[in-house]
Image (cartoon, rainbow, N blue to C red):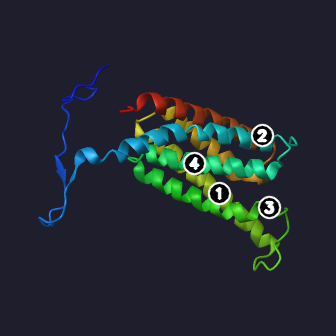
Amino acid sequence: MSISHHHTASGRPLRVSPAWVGAAGETKDQHLLPVREAVWVWSVRRYARTALWALPAAALLYGWTTLGIDTPPGPLLVMLAANWLSIIAMIALAGLLAGTRTRRSAVAGLLLGLAGFALTLPLAALPAGTAAAGSPLTADQLSLVEVVATAAIGAGWVLLGWAVFRSRLVNPADGVLLMLAAAAIGAGAHAQRPLPTVGALLLLAAGTGLAWTGGRLIPKH
């Protein structure tokens, strides 16, 4: 279906923005930016479409760590790579939903997820039940911090999944899968062996669906 310059894809009249953008209180000496120079919007969308593929990649790495298979780089590097790809996917998903009605939920989920990953990173290299030398926190307190961090990451994915579900921009089923995967992700290492693996599979399904539909439904120009 082609889109004309005066109508949207649904046939409704196209609302054209003013030719120049500027605040009411601006003086005549200040330069007003033309709307056509706001091409950064398309750059953000292009980044979001491409970076969404980081989500299924992160799910594959996360699922690999839940299987208990020895890898040459070591489980720590694989987990750090999975977390790094997850952060990229969260930023991309929040950018994709920035123009929808669920942008507040998406931003809240992004902030919670970033906070959780920031707490997880210093604890990743510590063995279970130990504390770093000179740390003001005991081993039990660090274990509590780890639980809070994984819960924050899970809550972030829940909010992002809810934003996807209500955005009407992509398939709402992907939002449901994302929320279901968040329960297993929030459980972290404290859950039994099958649950994290199932969560990784759900995250893989949700990420693949979001990346595929996001790349097809969102206009590229």
Of 131 and 190, nearer the camera is 131
The local crowd at label 2, few if under 14, some if 14 to 19, many if 20 or more residues have their Cα within 10 Å, is: some
Question: Could you tell me which secondary element the residue under label 2 belongs to?
Answer: helix
Question: Could you tell me which secondary element the residue under label 3 belongs to?
Answer: loop
User: Disc 2 marks which residue?
Assistant: 64
N-term mark: 1 or 4 = 4
N-term mark: 3 or 4 = 4
- x 81%, y 43%: residue: 193
Q: Is residue 140 left or right of residue 199?
A: right
User: Disc 4 marks which residue?
Assistant: 88
Q: At which x and y percent is residue 47?
A: 48, 42
Q: Is residue 61 left or right of residue 12?
A: right
Q: How far apart are labels 1 and 4 at the CA level?
A: 19 Å
N-term mark: 2 or 3 = 2
User: Disc 1 marks which residue?
Assistant: 151
User: Disc 3 marks which residue?
Assistant: 125
Q: How far apart are labels 2 and 4 at the CA level?
A: 19 Å
